[in-house]
Amino acid sequence: MTVDKQVERHHKIPGFWQHYIFSTNHKVIGIQYLITAFASALIAAGMAMLIRLEIAWPEHSWPILGTLFPGAFPGGVMRPEVYAALFTMHGTLMVFFFLSAALVGGFGNFLIPLQIGADDMAFPFLNMLSYWVYLTGLLVMLSSFFFSPGGPASAGWTSYPPLSALKTAIAGSDWGQSFWIVGMAFFIISFTMGGLNFVTTVLSMRTRGMHMMRLPLTTWALFTTAAVGILAFPALTAAVVMLFLDRHFGTSFFLPSGLYVAGKLLPNKGGSPLLWQHLFWFLGHPEVYIVMLPAMGFTSDILSTFCRKPIFGYPAMVGSILAIGSLSFIVWGHHMFVSGMNPYLGLFFDITTLIIAVPSAIKTFNWMATLWEAKIQLRTPMLFALAFVSLFVTGGLSGIFLAMAPADIQLHDTYFVISHFHFIMAGASLFGIFAATNFWFPKMFGRMMNETLGKFHFWITFITYYCTFFPMMFLGLHGEMRRLYDPVQYYTMFKSLQPINVFISINAFALGAAQLVFVFNFFWSMLRGEKASANPWNANGLEWTLSSPLPYENWEGNSPEVQRWPYDYSYPGAAKDYLPQVVPEQAAAGNY
Amino acid sequence: MEEIRRMEPIEGIHGLPEQVSAEQFAPSAFSRNRKKLMMWIFIISDALLFGSFLAVYTFERFISPSWPDRWKIFEPGYLAVMTVVLLSSSTFMAVAVEGLKQGKNRRFGFFYAVTILCGIVFLAMQAHEWAHFIGLGARLNTNPWGVPLFSGLFFMITGFHGFHVLTGVLILSFIGVLKLMGKVSDETIELAGMYWSFVDLVWVFILAVIYLL
Amino acid sequence: MKLLKRPLEAWGMFLIFALIVVIGTASFFIKWMPPLASNRISIDQMMNVLFIITGIFFVLVQGLTGYFIWKYSDQNKERSTYIPGSYALEVTWTLGTAIILAVLGIWGVKVWKKTVIQAPPPNALQVEVVAQQFSWSFLYPGPDGVFGKLNPKYISFLNPLGIDPKDSAGKQDVWTKDDLYLPVGKPVVLRIRSLDVVHSFFVPAFRVKQDAVPGMTISTWFIPEKKGKYEIACSQFCGRGHYTMRGTCFVVSNVRFQKELAHLRKEDEGE
Ligand code: HEM
Ligand SMILES: [Cu+2]
Ligand SMILES: [Cu+2]
C-alpha cells in the first residue's frame, strides 16, 4: 500500500470518454442507468399530467397547449388519439424504462458488487452493452412521437391485438406500434444481458465469508428479480416477434377469421387474440414483481438501519422473496378473469393469486415487527421506506378484491385497478427508489442529499400520492372505466363522480410538481451537498466500509472477509450500536 | 468480549449470527466456472424462448378445428438425415473438445471442422426444404395444405432455429480462425460447444412437436 | 411530558397514518357501488365481506405501523432491543393469513361457480351481442328461438351484422343498435362476440362484465331484477371512439318486451 501502488492505480483510471460515457465500471453504469431512468420518468410523469388534465376537464380548450402542440391539441383541445398515445407511452415508459431500469439497471448495477464484496460485475463489457441497448430502446420509443406516421403506439401498454395488430384499427397502430415493438425488443435484450450478469455475479463472485444467508436483502431481491426477468421475458419476446409478423407479414397468430375492420373484411384466419394476453401476462405479472422485489429489499435494509435493529425474521424474508419470485409465474391469469378464457382456469388463478398474498403478508408483518422495540431515526430514507410499507399494505389489500375472481368481474378495467397498481407497483417501487436514492446517494456522489429538501419532497409526495390514487378506488367501485378520454360526454352514470376527478387531478399536479424538488435536490446535492463520511448512517453493509465517494476500483484487490450477517444493529455487548459485516466476533466489543 | 461469548439465544428468537467456521470462507462453488454459469443461464433463457414458441404452436393447434397431416407434407427420410446430421455434430463437437483437453490438436482440428461442416449441411438441407415448400406455394400466411397458421408457425419456428444454427456455425468458424491464430482460450471453445449442443437439443423438441406429433 | 418529546417527523407520520386509517375506513362505509339490479347478489355479498376483512387488516396494520413509528421514535432509550425474529410469532401470522385466505379462496370458488360456470336455466332468453368499433348491436332470434348464422362476408349497409341470407333460421331474427331490451325477472343469456377488436360488455348495475373477443362467442347469463334504464359500457380500450361506445339497457315488463320485439319484427318486414 505504498506510493507505487497508488500511482499505478491512478494510471488505471481511464479518460473522460471511457470513464463517464463508455464505461465498463458497474458504478458508472448504475448511475447512467439511474439518471436516464429518471429522465424517462419525468417525461412519463408529464404525460400523466396531461392525462389528468383531460380527465378532470374533458375536451376543455387550453389555448397554451393549442399553441405549443397545434397538432395534438387543435384549438387547445386534446384529440382522442393523443390521449390513447399518452396513456400507452406513460405506462410503457414508467413500467419498463423507468422502474425496471432504475431498480435493476440502476441500483442493481451499483449495489450488487459492493454488497457482495466484488470488484465489478462478472462481465463488465456486457454490462456496458446493456446500458447502451437500453438507451437505444428508449430513444426508439420516444422517437415515435416525432417520426412515426400516425403517432406513437396507442393500444395501451398491454398492446392487445387485434387493436395493436391492425393498422386501420387506431392511428397509433399504423407505425407507432412497430416502434413500440422494436423499442421493447431493445429493452428485453438489454434486460437479459443485465440479468445474466447479475445472476452470475451473485452466484460466483461473493467474497470470502459472504454465503447466501449473509446477503443483505437488497441483494437477495435484486438477484431474484434478475432471475425472474430472465425466465419471464422470453414469453414477451416470442409475443412481440409474432405481433410484428402479424403486422407486417400477413400472418394470423393473433388474428382470428372474419375480422371486419374499417369497412373491410380481412383475409386473416384462425389466430387467437387470447394467445397474446396469455403471453403478455406471463411476462406482465412477473414484471410487477420485478419492480416490487428490489423496492422490498431496499425497504428491509433501510428499515433495519434506521431502527438500529436487525430485520425481523431474516430467513422468512429470504423465503418470501423466493416464494414471491416463483409463484409469480403461475398467477398471470388473474388479469384475464373476464377475458373469455376457460372459466375453470379462472378458479386455478384465483387460488394461486391468494397463495401469493401469504408471502407478501409475511413481509409486511416482519417490517412492522422490525419497528417494535426499536429506537427509530426518522431520516429521509426512513420516511420513504415507512411510506413504502403503507402503500404496500393499501395496494396489497385492494389486491385481494382483484384476486377474487367474482369481485374482479365488477372491478376489472376500472379505476380500481389503476388505483391498486399505482399503490402496489408504481407507488411502492417509486417510494423504494426515493428511499434508496436518498440512502445510497453519499456512496454515489460523496455528498449527502439535503435533508430539508428531502423531507419537504417526502411530505408533499406522501400526502398527494394518497390523495391522488386512493379516491380512484371509489371511481372504480362505481364502475368508471380506465382509458376513458371523456368520462362524461356519453356516460351519464359518471357525471356525479366528476368532482372526485377534479380533486384527483389537482393532487396529481401537486404530486408532479413536488418531483421537481427531488430533481433539484438530486443535482444540487450532487454538486453542492454536504460532504459525506464513509459511513454516514452507521450501517453494516460492505459498501459502507469503502470511502465516499467510492474509489474507482472497489477493493483494489483486497476483497473483504465477511464475518457476520448485515443486520447486527444494537448487538448486545458490542461497543457501538452497529457491527459492520467485516468485524469479527472477537473485535465486536472493541473499537471498529 | 466476555459478554458476547456468554450470550445465549433468547428463547424463541432465532437468526443470531452463527459462529464463524473455516469452511464458511471457502469461495463460492461457481467462482471458477463463471462463464459456464452464464452460458447455462443464457441457455435456460433461450430455451424458454423456444418453449414459448412451441407452446404457441400447441395452443394454436388445439384451438384450430383441423390441422394438416404432417406425414403427407414432410419426407420422413429427409428429416431423418437432417436430424442425424445435426445430432451427430454434437457428438463430434464433444469429441473435439475432449481432444482439446487432452492436447491432441489434430484430433481436435478434424472433429471441429466436421462439426462446422455438419452445421452447414443441415442449413443447406433446411434451405432446400424451405425452397421446396415455397415452390409448392407455402408462405407465412398461406399454404396448399389448408390451415394457414400452420405454415406461419412452421416458417417462424424452424426459421428461428435455423437462425440459431447459422449463428452457431458463424461463431464456431470465427473461433476456429482465432484458434488457428492462437488467440482463443480453451474455455471459449468449450462454451461454443455448449451453445452448439443446446441448438441441437432444441431441434429434437422442434422435430417432436412440429413434425411428428 | 416525556411521552410527548418526540421529533416532529414522528408526529407528522402519526398524523398521516391516523388520517389514512380514519378517512380510509370512513369512506368505505359509503355505498360506492351502484345499487344492484340483477341476481348477482353473491358478488355484492362478497364485496361486503371483503370490505370487512380487508378493512380490519387495513386499520390494524396501518394503525399499528403509525403507532409504532410514533412510539419507538422515543429518543430517550439507550438502544434498540436486539430481536432478530420469533418463530412463534411468525408461524402465527403466517398460518393466520393462510387460513383467512384459504377460506376466502374456497368461497371465491363457490361464487365463481355460481355466477360464471353454472349453466343458465333452459328457459333463458337468448340475445346475441355484437360489438364493433364503436357500437353495440343486439340480435334476437325469431319465434323459432334459433339464431341464424352470422358471417362477416355478408356485411353490408342493410345487413351490418352479416346475417347469412341463406340460413333460413336467420330470416326472422331481428336486431337493434345500442338499445338492449330485456324482460324483468327472466334469465337472459348474452352470447357476446366482436367483429373487429376486443371490447368488453359491462353493466355496473348488473355486476356483469365480459370481454367481446373477435373469433369467439362467449356466453354469460344473469337475471335483470329491477325495471329501469341502465347504461352499457365498453370497458376494454378499443380505439379512438372507445369513450363513445355506450349502449342502453331497458329492463321492462314482459308485455312491453314482447311489444318491442313485435315492433322490431314489423319494421324488419317493412324493409
Ligand atoms: C406521477 C404520478 C402518476 C400519475 C398522476 C399517474 C396517473 C395515471 C393515470 C390517470 C392513469 C390512467 C390513464 C387512463 O386509464 O386513462 C395511469 C395509467 C398507468 N400508469 Fe400511471 N401515474 C403516475 C405514475 C405512474 C408510475 C410511477 C407508474 C409505474 C409503474 C405508472 C404506471 C401506469 C400504468 C402501467 C398505467 C396503465 C396504462 C394503460 O392503461 O395502458 N404510473 N397513470
Ligand atoms: Cu398480475
Ligand atoms: Cu371500448
Image (cartoon, grey):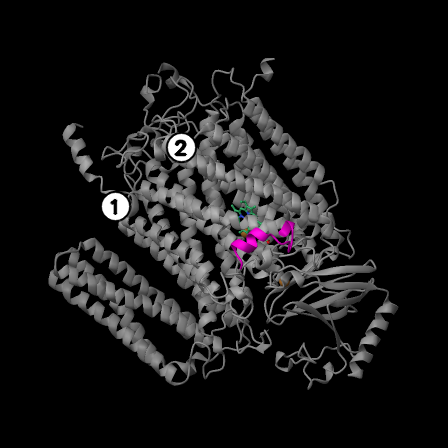
Q: Secondary structure at mark 1?
A: helix
Chain letter of mark 2 equals: A
Q: Which mark is residue A525?
A: 2
Q: Residue at x 60, y 27 (%)?
A: C14
In the rendered image of this protein, does residue A282 appear above or below residue A542?
below
Question: Is B79 placed above or below A33 here?
Answer: below
In three-dimensional space, the C-alpha distance between marks 1 and 2, rounded to whole angstroms, equals 25 Å
Q: Which residues are magenta?
A: A55-70
Numbered badge on residue B72: none
Position in image of residue A269 (x %, y %): 53, 76
In the displayed structure, A116 sits above or below A263; it is above
Tag in front: 1 or 2: 2
Marks 1 and 2 belong to one chain: yes
Q: Is residue C14 visible from the viewing direction of this image?
A: yes
Quadrant assignment, res A398: top right
Q: Position of residue C225 (x, y in %)?
A: 81, 58
The disc numbered 1 marks a residue on which chain?
A
Q: Residue A520 magenta-drawn?
A: no
Q: Quadrant of the N terminus of chain A?
A: top left
Residue type marked 2: Ser
Left or right placement of residue C168 versus residue B177 in this view: right
- The image shows residue C108 at horizontal and vertical percentages of 66, 51
Quadrant location of ligand 3?
Answer: bottom right
Q: Residue at x 46, y 44 (%)?
A: A322
Type of amino acid under label 1: Gln
- Which numbered disc flags the more N-terminal residue, 1 or 2? 1
Most foreground residue, C70 or B58: C70
Disc 1 target residue: A18
